[in-house]
Image (cartoon, coloured by chain):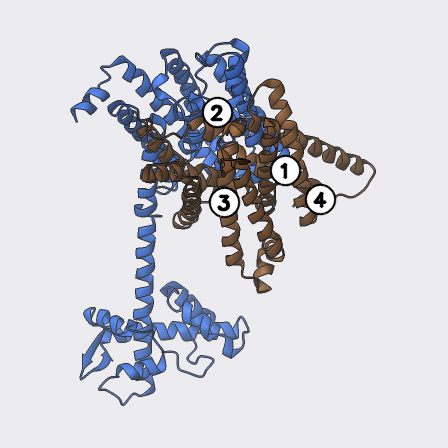
Amino acid sequence: MAAVWIIAVSCLIGICCAWIGSILVIRRMAMLSDAVSHSVLPGIVAAYLLIEEMDYGIFIIAAAVTAFISTMLIEGVSKLANYRKDVSMGIIYTLLFSIGIILLSAHQDSVPIQSDHIIQGNLEMIPLEELWIINDVYSLGPYPIWSSLLNLVVVVITFALAYRGIKLISFDHSYASVKGVKTSRWNLIFMALTSLTVVISFSEIGAILVIGFIVIPPATALIFSKKLSHVLLYSSLISCASCIGGYFLARHFDSSVAGSICVVMGILFFIVFCFDNLRAKFAQKNGVRIEHKE
Amino acid sequence: MRDFIEFISLSNPTVKIVLIGVVLISLSSSLVGNFAFLRKRAMLGDAISHSVFPGVCLSFIVSGEKDPLMILIYSIVTGLIAMFLIDVIGRHKKVKVETAIGIVLSIFFGLGIMLISYIQGNLGDAQSGLQHFFFGQAAAMSREDVQVFLYCSIIIAGTIILFYKGLKQVSFDREHAIATGQPVVLLEIVLSILTVMAIAIGINAVGVILMAALLITPASTARLWTNRLFPMMVIAAILSVVSAIGGAFISYKYSGMPTGPWVVVLLSIMAFGSILFSPKRGALSRVIARKRLERKILKENILKTLFKLQEADKEQTSGFSLQEINCLKAFDGRALERGLKWLQQEKSTQIKNNKWTLTASGNQIGKRITRVHRLWELYLTNKVKLDIDHVHPSAESLEHIITPEIERMLQEELNFPDKDPHNKLIP
């Protein structure tokens, strides 16, 4: 049963991240997930210090607020100082993460947040977590499965309602605004969706491996598919396959599940990548013209 | 204060080791950080610092102990592999460089997480202390560690001095460096090795996650103060040493406080200070400069309008009311009144019975702006062949920018004309 819970939660998270990631990767904003996932820490610690209890809902709100603040700060700093985006990202997320660590060490004894889990995730712990039990009888399974399911539902509904808008802003931003699509509104909604996904995922798979979940499956799918709907489908499949593969790899080596999933995602990426390169070489030899980058 | 003197005098041998270690680390990463920043590779440092982590774990699995030299060698090798992979993946036509960075970062870190949980499960982590590499543990530095840091810093500083000229050219203008026959590929490899080396020692103090700050924050802050590489390197070095000492002191004074995050926080405070207050590129000075320009434009527009009013009605000597000025050119809100007050203080305008007139000096400026405006309109119609009704907006903005030199050149180019395209006199 434990295996089922772990695989189910990781697949749910994997699909959410893959969908969000497809848009981020297409829009060249992949590293934004990195910045957001790191800057969530001070929000969670501060929320705990303020309300002094573990409340999942408030954590998610606090984390989403810090994630939002950090994206605003990144924007602001790169405007104020004329920095490239990546420079201001580097400055802001390291600062926020430091503040988080400092808060955590100042209240080491009172805050039950383990810094290891922030890094490594704790997918393994899911079956041991409290179960959601109704009327003392019906067990609905561990909490994370519900939070990640809810996240998936929100993501899917938003995509279903706004598919055209999201597609337009990700492939051709200026065309979208010319067509009268309210780009700033879609951008904001999409940023909120990203923050939500990162926040819900990061407590299970760790702040850094979120980046892998967000970037690798879409990047793999983008190598061999052109339509957005295909990218979404294939990246979800790749994600789920890696989750299942990663779980058994972790069992075999007795190691971290989240880490192993990322490694399997990486292996799948490299298989596709090498295959595509070979195909391109082969096609070149046969005299077929191939479009070159830039 | 006494605490600080006691701390800085290095009387305590443990403090001495930690302080020297942190300073060496910050110094060497800020040195290579300048080049990473200038070569627009800010996030690459982040990726490499996450990628050296499996190297750290691997060295522990292979040698079974925490040997600083082994850790260094293994992490440099994995860091270089990661850098190579980012380069290879980023060249693929369907994968962008940012994506490649994200991919390699998470695969390597995932591998590191796998290895560390394997070590914890099978080899016993009591003596490994590998968790320190997540957040850094400056207090746990040993004498041997600091010796390794010292050698690395000497190698980094020495190589930079040796190849200074070439590295500078490669960082500022790669094409130019190729054209002047610099061994660009070799220099880039050297720079990569130095960067990986600085990161590999740096993660001891601040950990893999905060390492990006040690590389990027000092360099990007220093860039706000200077346009030249050498002063930039000196400023970055000073900033990083100051924050290293500060961070080490805070963790010495308040037990339980981590060194690395405090170094990063101090660095960021200095960065924000510079972003706001640096004289050349700071936000504040830019705001002041913009306000000054807005003020100048407003004043010049008022003087020009008064001049044109006077020109249209030469008999009128008593001056013009606010309404009359606003009729010819609409100013927004209270801007007109404010501008007239400033001009009055500068003795360019004067007021009598609520009517404004130009003084001699104000008249001269107004005349000059009108002249430049009309000259530019004429230039656009005669030389650029624009329609008459298209030239006004351009002249409206350029009249504030054209210098006396350009004005003279325009006059020469147009053979000292006396009429503008709207048949008005050029004063």
Q: Amino acid at mark 2?
A: Leu
Residue holding disc 2: B194
Q: Amino acid at mark 3?
A: Leu
Tell me the amino acid under the disc marked 4. Ser
Looking at the image, residue A68 lies above or below residue A143: below
Q: Are marks 3 and 2 on the same chain?
A: no
Q: Is A153 left or right of B157, judged from the image as shown?
A: right
Q: Residues within 10 Å of mark 1 (few under 14, many from 20)?
A: many
In this figure, which residue is indicated by the disc labeled 3?
A196
The picture's colour for chain A is brown
**Which of the two discs, 2 and 1, sits closer to the camera?**
1
Residue B354 x/y as whole percent: 20, 82
Q: Is residue A82 above or below residue B153?
A: below
Give how far apart the Cα atoms at labels 2 and 4 are.
Answer: 39 Å
Q: Which mark is first along the chain, 4 or 3?
A: 3
Nearer to us of marks 3 and 4 is: 3
Check disc 1 and report the residue beneath it: A217
How far, Cα to Cα, is label 2 from label 1?
A: 32 Å
